[in-house]
Amino acid sequence: MTTIIEKKISNKTLTQGILILHLIIILFILLIGYIIFRNDFFYFKNHFRNYLMSTKLLYIGAFFTILLISIVIHELIHGYFFARYNHSGWKSVKFGFNIKMLAPYATCQEPVKVKHFRIIVAMPTIILGIIPLLISLSIYHNLLLFFYAAFMILSGIGDILVLWVVRKLDANQYIIDHPRTLGYFLINNYQVDELPEIQKQIHKPEHQSKKEKKSNSKKLLWIFIITFLFVFIIKLIMKRF
C-alpha cells in the first residue's frame, strides 16, 4: 500500500540556508570577478560613463529584460525535465506564480524518482548559470556574461538548498513537489493507479495559523525594504556614472 510522508523545509532552515548560500556564492563571485575581470570592469565603467543617459537606461533596461526572460526560461527548464521523467509527461506539469515569494514556479503533480528529481532541480542553474560562468571565464572572456551567470546562479539558490535537503534520500525512492511550500512528499510503494488518491491527499487545504500569517507579513515587509534599498543603490550608481 502507498504511504505518503510530508517533509517541509522549516523557516529557520530556509532562512539560514539561503543566507549562508548567498554569502558563499557572492564571496566566490566577487573573488573570481576581482581576479579575472578587474581591468575589464574599470574599462567598462569609464566607457559607460561617456554614454548619454538615454543610452545608459536602454542598456540597463535590456540587461534586466534578459534577466526576467531568463527567470521564465529557468522555470520552463524545470518543466521540461519534469515532463521527461514523470509518467504522464506535460499533463502533470504546472506553472504558476508564488505571491508569497514573488517568484514564478514550475511543479509536477506526479511522483518522480529522487535521482531524476535532482536532475530536474539542478538543470536550470547548470544551463543558465554554471555553463555561462565557465564560458565567461575561459572560452569567451566577457564581463557582462559573467554578471549574467552570477545572477542566474544566485536566482537558483532555492534549488541548491533543495538539493542539499534531499542529498541523503534513496535515489530510487519516489518524491513529489510540495504544492504549498518549499518541501516535498516521499511516496513509498508508489503505484501509478493510486495517483488520483495521492494527489487528493497532498492537495488538502491547510489551515494557516496566526503565527504563519505574521511571518508572511514580515517577509513582505523585508521584500519591500530590500527592493527600496536596491533602487536607492542603483540611483547612486547612476549618479556616479
Image (tube, rainbow, N blue to C red):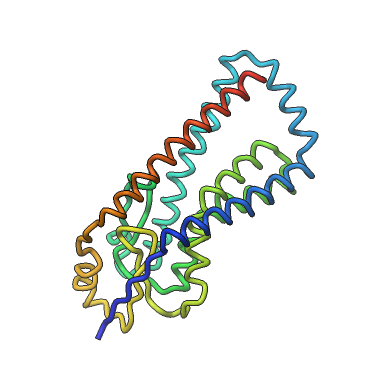
Residue 88 occupies quadrant? bottom left
Residue 75 location (% of width, % of height): 42, 51
Residue 229 location (% of width, % of height): 52, 32
227 or 177, which is in the foreground?
227
Taking the spot 45% from the left edge, 60% from the top edge, the residue there is 12
Taking the spot 54% from the left edge, 27% from the top edge, the residue there is 232
Question: Looking at the rendering, in which quadrant would you find the N terminus?
Answer: bottom left
Residue 207 position (above or below residue 30): below
Taking the spot 20% from the left edge, 60% from the top edge, the residue there is 205
Residue 127 location (% of width, % of height): 55, 53
101 or 77, which is in the foreground?
101
Residue 222 position (above or below residue 172): above
48 or 15, which is in the foreground?
15
Q: Name the residue furthest bottom.
A: 1
97 or 234, which is in the foreground?
234
Residue 182 location (% of width, % of height): 39, 59
Residue 55 occupies quadrant? top right
Q: Is residue 43 left or right of residue 170?
A: right
Q: Is residue 117 left or right of residue 176?
A: right
Question: Looking at the rendering, in which quadrant would you find the C terminus?
Answer: top right
Residue 41 occupies quadrant? top right
